[in-house]
Image (cartoon, helix red, strand yellow):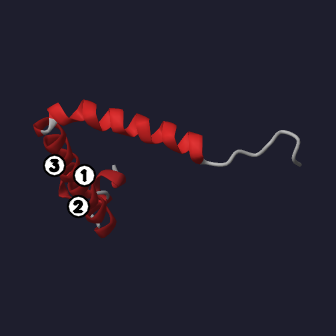
Protein backbone atom coordinates (compact mmCIF):
# COMPACT_ATOMS: atom_id res chain seq x y z
CA UNK A 1 0.00 0.00 0.00
CA UNK A 2 2.80 2.40 0.86
CA UNK A 3 4.50 1.77 -2.51
CA UNK A 4 1.36 2.84 -4.31
CA UNK A 5 1.53 6.17 -2.54
CA UNK A 6 5.28 6.77 -2.94
CA UNK A 7 5.91 5.57 -6.49
CA UNK A 8 4.66 7.60 -9.41
CA UNK A 9 2.93 6.06 -12.34
CA UNK A 10 4.94 5.83 -15.57
CA UNK A 11 2.60 8.29 -17.30
CA UNK A 12 3.22 10.91 -14.62
CA UNK A 13 7.01 10.61 -14.74
CA UNK A 14 9.00 13.13 -16.80
CA UNK A 15 11.55 11.49 -19.13
CA UNK A 16 15.16 12.11 -18.17
CA UNK A 17 17.92 13.74 -20.20
CA UNK A 18 19.46 10.43 -21.26
CA UNK A 19 16.10 9.18 -22.50
CA UNK A 20 15.46 12.38 -24.44
CA UNK A 21 18.97 12.31 -25.96
CA UNK A 22 18.55 8.70 -27.06
CA UNK A 23 15.13 9.51 -28.54
CA UNK A 24 16.61 12.41 -30.53
CA UNK A 25 19.47 10.21 -31.76
CA UNK A 26 17.01 7.49 -32.78
CA UNK A 27 14.78 10.00 -34.58
CA UNK A 28 17.79 11.37 -36.51
CA UNK A 29 18.93 7.87 -37.42
CA UNK A 30 15.42 6.99 -38.58
CA UNK A 31 15.27 10.12 -40.73
CA UNK A 32 18.66 9.30 -42.27
CA UNK A 33 17.36 5.81 -43.08
CA UNK A 34 14.22 7.26 -44.66
CA UNK A 35 16.20 9.67 -46.84
CA UNK A 36 18.69 7.01 -47.96
CA UNK A 37 15.89 4.54 -48.72
CA UNK A 38 14.06 7.20 -50.74
CA UNK A 39 17.28 7.94 -52.68
CA UNK A 40 17.83 4.26 -53.48
CA UNK A 41 14.22 3.76 -54.56
CA UNK A 42 14.34 6.87 -56.75
CA UNK A 43 17.55 5.67 -58.44
CA UNK A 44 16.62 2.02 -58.82
CA UNK A 45 17.64 1.74 -62.53
CA UNK A 46 21.26 2.60 -61.62
CA UNK A 47 21.44 -0.11 -58.95
CA UNK A 48 22.62 -3.01 -61.21
CA UNK A 49 25.35 -0.79 -62.68
CA UNK A 50 26.59 0.02 -59.21
CA UNK A 51 26.79 -3.66 -58.27
CA UNK A 52 28.59 -4.59 -61.48
CA UNK A 53 31.11 -1.80 -60.87
CA UNK A 54 31.58 -2.90 -57.28
CA UNK A 55 32.21 -6.51 -58.35
CA UNK A 56 34.67 -5.38 -61.04
CA UNK A 57 36.57 -3.21 -58.55
CA UNK A 58 36.76 -6.13 -56.11
CA UNK A 59 38.19 -8.46 -58.76
CA UNK A 60 40.65 -5.78 -59.88
CA UNK A 61 41.89 -5.21 -56.34
CA UNK A 62 42.16 -8.95 -55.73
CA UNK A 63 44.42 -9.23 -58.78
CA UNK A 64 46.71 -6.25 -58.07
CA UNK A 65 47.15 -6.55 -54.28
CA UNK A 66 50.33 -8.48 -53.46
CA UNK A 67 49.80 -11.81 -51.77
CA UNK A 68 52.03 -13.42 -49.19
CA UNK A 69 53.60 -16.67 -50.33
CA UNK A 70 52.94 -19.83 -48.33
CA UNK A 71 56.71 -20.45 -47.94
CA UNK A 72 57.36 -17.10 -46.27
CA UNK A 73 57.21 -17.04 -42.56
The residue that label 3 is drawn on is 35
Q: Is residue 13 above or below residue 55?
A: below
The residue that label 1 is drawn on is 10
User: Residue at the location (34% across, 32% down)?
Assistant: 52
Q: Does residue 9 appear anywhere in the picture?
A: no
Q: Quadrant of residue 18?
A: bottom left
Of the two numbered discs 3 and 2 in the rendering, the one whose residue sits closer to the viewer: 3
User: Residue at the location (53% across, 44% down)?
Assistant: 61
Residue 19 x %, y %: 30, 61
Q: Is residue 16 left or right of residue 40?
A: right
Categorize mark 1 by other alpha carbons within 10 Å: few (<14), some (14-19), many (20+): few
Distance CA(mark 1)–CA(mark 2): 20 Å
**Residue 52 marker:** none
* N-term mark: 1 or 2: 1
Query: Do callouts 1 and 3 mark residues in contact (Cβ within 8 Å)?
Result: no
Q: Helix, strand, or loop for circle 3? A: helix
Categorize mark 3 by other alpha carbons within 10 Å: few (<14), some (14-19), many (20+): few
Residue 55 x %, y %: 42, 34
19 and 50: which is toward the camera = 50
Of the two numbered discs 1 and 2 in the rendering, the one whose residue sits closer to the viewer: 2
48 and 31: which is toward the camera = 48
The residue that label 2 is drawn on is 24
Amino acid sequence: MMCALLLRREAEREPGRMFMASERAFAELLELYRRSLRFVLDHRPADPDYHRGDAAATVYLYIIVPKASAAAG
